[in-house]
Image: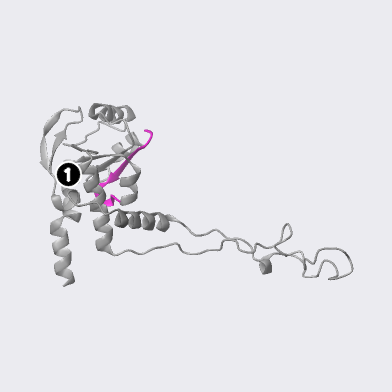
Amino acid sequence: MKVDVYTTQGEKSGSIELAESVFGVPFNEALVHQAMVRQLANRRQGTADSLRRGEVNGSTRKLSAQKHTGRARRGDRRSPLLKGGGVAFGPHPRSYRQDMPKKMRRLALRCVLSAKARDGEIKILDKIELSGPRTQEMLGILIALGVDTSTLIATVEADGNMLISARNLEDVKTIPANLLNVADLLSYKALIMTKDAVHKVEELWGQKSVKKATASGS
């Protein structure tokens, strides 16, 4: 798949051939959904906790006689029926972590990248060089490219100037290419990548890496 390459001024500077093994994969909705649910589940801390009946401070004396008082048979003050009592079925610390085979995770990522490429939601830049941490300069790049929606900017490695320049822009996030993930790709409409970032992605998740992993596993 061949796509145009732009400068930061929005002018075409050439084209690049995207690897079919990364950007030409059929979309697998079930696999992508599983990868998304797994990633969101693994973000959860699972630290919510509530006091059980036996953990609440208070007397265990029965509040009133069982019969002949006309009052409810509630037991002690730690009963879940009373204010300040224990919680019957409340949350307790647990792990929400889900596992997923590496091959499935990588295929899900390629599926989302391929979908963005087919829908024309990927823009490739020759390179991004900022004179300093300037939000206005980053905004000018997005305007020049005609991007007016939520945007994920992927570079070959972390860039301090770009991070500071983009963090004050609404719905704009920067990320190193090796940290691209399904949740971020689905959360942002447009994907801007530098040529070096494209090569990095193809190196990490392309056909060569798949063959290498298969050979090492055999």
Total marks placed? 1
Give the magenta-colored segment's residue range: 168-181
46 with respect to 129 (left or right): right
User: In which quadrant will I find the C terminus?
Assistant: bottom left
Q: Mark 1 points at which residue?
A: 196
Q: Which residue lies furthest to the bottom in this view?
A: 218
Q: Nearer the viewer, residue 134 or 35?
A: 35
Place of residue 7 in the rendered image (x, y in percent of width and height, measured from the top left): 17, 31
Query: Which residue type does callout 1 highlight?
Result: Asp
Q: Is residue 84 magenta?
A: no
Q: Residue at x 14, y 68 (%)?
A: 215
Tell me where residue 16 sits by quadrant: top left
Q: Which residue is drawn at 64% across and 63% down?
A: 51
Place of residue 47 in the rendered image (x, y in percent of width and height, measured from the top left): 52, 59
Tell me where residue 42 sits by quadrant: bottom left
Q: Residue at x 61, y 63 (%)?
A: 89
User: From the viewer's perspective, is residue 80 above or below residue 154?
Assistant: below
Q: Nearer the viewer, residue 38 or 10?
A: 38
Place of residue 217 in the rendered image (x, y in percent of width and height, measured from the top left): 18, 70
Q: Is residue 174 magenta?
A: yes
215 with respect to 77 (left or right): left
